[in-house]
Image: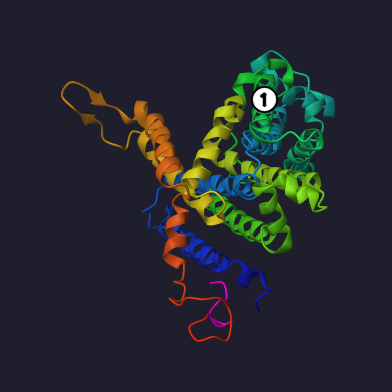
Amino acid sequence: MKNTLIARNPSILWFLLALSVFTVSVTVLSEATGFGLISTSFLKTLGKTLCLCLVAIAMDVVWGYCGILSLGHFAFFGIGGYAIGMWLMYARTEAIVQTSLQASVLPPTPQEVTDAIGSQIFGVVGSSDFPAIWMFSHSLPLQLLAVVLVPGLLAFVFGWLAFRSRVTGVYLSILTQAMTLALSLYLFQNDTGLRGNNGLSGLQNIPGLEDRGQDIVSLWFFWASALALGLGYVLFAYVVSGKFGSVIRAIRDNEARVRFLGYHVEQYKLFVFTLTAMVSGIAGALYYPQAGIINPAEIAPIASIYLAVWVAIGGRGRLYGAVIGAALVSLLSSWFTGGSAPNINLGFYVIKWTDWWLVLLGLSFVLVTLFFPKGIGGVFDAIAKKKDPERQGDFGPDQGAWRDKEGEPS
C-alpha cells in the first residue's frame, strides 16, 4: 500500500473530494437547474477559473518541481485557444453562409461556399482567402489534435534547442519570454491568418447547440473544465511522485550533481516542458469558448508573468498550492476589476480598485516572497505536519533512542 499513488500523494483524494463537492454545489445553484443563485456570467467565470487552475498546475510542475522558470507557458495556453477557436469560427460561419445561400436560384458550388466563408471571416482584415494555417479548420478532430500537438511541438523544439545548449536560470527565463513576445507580435499582424488584433470572436456560440441556452452550454463547459482539472491533477501528481519526481526535484536543487550521477538531465527537462505545454493547450481550449474571444494580447508576456505570480502566492512546489493561488487571484481580479469592489474615499483621494488592482497584486507577490516563501500552501503543510517524537538519540536499542517505527517519515 505504501507504493500506491495515493499513499505517495494523499492530497489527491482531498483535492478530488473538494473539487467534486464544489462542482455539485455550483451545478445545483446555477441558473440551468432553476435555482438561479449563481448567474450564467459568474458560472462562466468559475469555469474559466478552473482552466486557469489547470495551467497553474502545469506551471508549478515545470517551475516548482523541475526548477524551470518559464515565462512563456501562457503562450501554449493561447495556442490551444486559437486552435479550437478556428474550428468554432469556421463551423459557425459555414452554417450562416449555407443558410443565406439556400435562397439562391442555383445551388452554390463548394468553391462559392468556401469563398463566402472566407469573406465573412477575413473581411475584417481586408482579405477573403483562407491562409494555409486554416487548412484543417473544417475538421473538429484535427483541430482538437492541434490543441495538443501544436503547443507540444513548439515546446519540444524550443526545449530541445535550449536544454541541449544547457541554458539555465535567468537566461532560460528570458528566452521563454522572448519566444512569447515574438509570437504575440507576430499574431498582431493582419497577414498571419488569425485576423491580427481583432483575434477570433464569438467563440461562445457553439455550432450545433444553437437551440441550447447559454446557461446550459456554460454549465457543460464548467463540467468539462472541472473534469480536465481533476484529471490534470492526478496526471501531474503521478509525474511528480516516485523516482521520476525525485529526479526532477533533484534537477531543481542541483542540476550539475544529477548530471554527474549519470542521469540525462536534458531528457527529463524536455519531457516536463513538453508535457506541461500540451496540458496548457488543453486548458486554453476550454477557457476561450467560455471567454468568447481570443486575441494576441492574451499571449503577451505579462500573462505568463501573472501565471508565475499565482504559483508563487499559492505555494511553489505544491500542486494544490498552484490551484489555490490561481483561484484566489483570478476571482479577486474579477471582483476588483469588474467594479464590484467599493471605492475607498480618503477625502483627498479616491482609491479606485480598477486602477489599483495590479499594484495590490504586485505588493502581495513581494510580501509573500519575503515573509511567506512557501505561499498559502505552506499553511496547509504546517497544519498537516505531524510532530516528531520528543525523544533524543539515534535509531538504536538504547533507552531513549528512537525506534524504527517512531522514526518513519510522517
Residue 235: x %, y % from top left:
67, 58
Determine whether the residue tagged by mark 1 lies in a helix, strand or loop: helix
Relative image position of residue 155 (x, y in whole percent): 75, 38
Task: Give the colour scheme of this rendering.
Answer: rainbow
Q: Residue furthest top?
A: 126
Q: Quadrant of the N terminus?
A: bottom right
- Residue 15 is situated, as x and y percent measured from the top left of the image, at 52, 63
Examine the image and state in which quarter residue 368 appears: top left
On the image, which quarter does residue 296 sit in?
Answer: top right
The quarter holding residue 404 reads bottom right
Predominant secondary structure in magenta?
A: loop
Question: What residue sits 68% from the left and 42% below the top?
Answer: 281
- Residue 196 vertical placement versus 386 (above, below): above
Residue type, label 1: Ala
**Residue located at (81% from left, 52% from top):** 263
Furthest toward the left, the residue is 347
Range drawn in magenta: 402-410
**Magenta region includes residue 236:** no
Residue 406 falls within the magenta-colored stretch: yes
Asked whether residue 238 appears in the rendered view, the answer is: yes
- The residue at which mark 1 appears reads as 178
Q: Is residue 92 visible?
A: no
For this rendering, which residue is in front, 319 or 386?
A: 386
Residue closest to the eye, 232 or 69? 69
Is 162 drawn above or below residue 268 in the view shown? above
The percent position of residue 224, horizontal first and vertical second, equals 60, 54
Count of all numbered marks drawn on residues in the image: 1
Q: Residue at x 46, y 49 (%)?
A: 375
Residue 244 versus residue 161 in the image, above or below: below
